[in-house]
Amino acid sequence: MSLVIKNGTAFINGHFEKKDICIEDGIITNIGSNLKADEKINATDMLVLPGLIDPHVHLREPGQEYKEDFVTGGRAAIAGGFTTVIDMPNNLPPIVTKKRFEEKAKLAKKALCDVLLHFGGTDKNFDEVKKADPLSLKLYLAKTTGEMMLHNPDSLEHHYENFPSNRPIVLHACGDSSDPETNVKQSCEKTEHAISLANKMKRHIHLAHASTKSEVLIAQKCKTCTVEVAPHHLFLSVRDESRLGPFAKVYPPLRSEQKRIYLWQSLEMVDCIATDHAPHTTEDKENGAAGLPGLETSLSLMLTACDQGLLDKIWVVQRMSENIVDIFNLKKKGRLKKGYAGDITIVDPKREWEVCGSDLETKCKWSPFEGKKLKGKVHTVIRNGNPVYLEYCFI
Ligand code: DOR
Ligand code: ZN
């Protein structure tokens, strides 16, 4: 079957232009004008984007399916415009052996979007990392949900040596103190240490969820370091804690309002946006769980900021698609280009909506952005040439 997306404003070669896009057998086969195909989707007044990619999600399966699973998490991804996500290894038990990695990859096939997996590093599993041969390795240098964390100070260097230097090692380099100032200081120290070592060893590292301008500036000192920022650190600060109570808890923590504003000033140096979608039940949140869901609000938050003149649409789309492909060496994804995957996200930039947790696809059914009015919404999502979400509804 062939499909054409007609009359949209498409993101092609770094800019927006009116073009039709034709997909055949799951692959983009033509980009041009007046194209024809068996099926047609009308994208007049819409933005046509490459299927977005989220390099940092926690879909919780296996082990914590009561919080989220590949079906609900996959639906949340699609509704948020993501056709590919990369899932974190802090499952219960953690994904630190080849066997668990392969079992998880099988489970992930039931998701409506493509799910790729980060592999977890421990103080001992160097041989397992080699055997599993993943696209990236995640190292926790501080506490997280679950039990993953490096304890031995030598393990970082050992993993740096052991893992192919052109594949990214993703670092959770956040502080763990509950005192805000100390936490920021620890985050900077951990980042500085990890980065100076990477610089010396000329290896690619990727700094997960940088939450302050200081961390971004530190990362900037290393040519082989890329940096991601999560929308919750751009749109929420400690000011929101009184409203959200335990629902504001996240690692790295929300920062001061001043630091949030400084983070915006560092965006020119940021390589990608990652949701860090980390759903928990309301009961778990009330009992102190850290993490916020973000798959279904992130793109709209960023587009709303574009509408307000705070961000540039091109900057946003690049950081939610092609930059991620380049960082994680993903093949034939993230760009609207002949020969690339027929993964496409169509967005109505004018559509206004209000975040309502109970309407979301994520199993947790709440959002730290509850009640927020946003402008710009995912209208249609095509995965591998097949529409899976059409005019705001799943097929
Ligand atoms: O707040 C967080 N939640 N930070 C993490 O590092 C992990 C995540 C989770 O898995 O819940
Ligand atoms: Zn995370």
Image (cartoon, grey):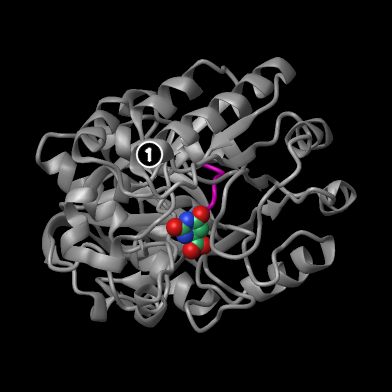
User: In the rendered view of the protein, which quadrant contains the C terminus?
Assistant: bottom left
Residue toward you, 323 or 249: 249
Left or right, 15 with reference to 71: left
Q: Is 387 one of the magenta-colored residues?
A: no
Q: Is residue 109 left or right of residue 350?
A: right
Above or below, comparing residue 322 to residue 51 in the picture: above
User: From the viewer's perspective, is 275 left or right of 352?
Assistant: right
* Secondary element type, mark 1: loop
Q: Residue at x 76, y 42 (%)?
A: 152
Q: Is residue 355 left or right of residue 289?
A: left
In this view of the protein, can residue 381 be seen by the observer?
yes
- Residue 302 position within the rendered picture, expressed as x and y whole percent measured from the top left: 24, 46
Magenta span covers which residues?
338-342
Q: Looking at the image, can residue 385 be seen?
A: no
Residue 210 location (% of width, % of height): 43, 37
Q: Position of residue 256 (x, y in %)?
A: 24, 40
Please say if 315 is above or below 5: above
**Quick check: is the Cβ at mark 1 less than 8 Å away from ligand 1?**
no
- The residue sitting at 84% across, 51% down in the picture is 125
Which picture quadrant has residue 141? top right
Label 1 packing within 10 angstroms: few (<14), some (14-19), many (20+): many
Q: Which of 168 and 93 lies nearest the eye of the viewer?
A: 93
Q: Would you identify the image quadrant in which residue 243 lies?
A: bottom left
Magenta highlight: main SS: loop
Q: What residue appears at the point 83 percent right and 67 percent down from the top-left corner?
A: 99
Report which residue position mark 1 lands on: 211
Viewer-side residue, 237 vs 373: 237
Residue 330 position (above or below residue 369): above
For residue 365, above or below residue 303: below
**Type of amino acid at the residue the image marks with label 1:** Ser
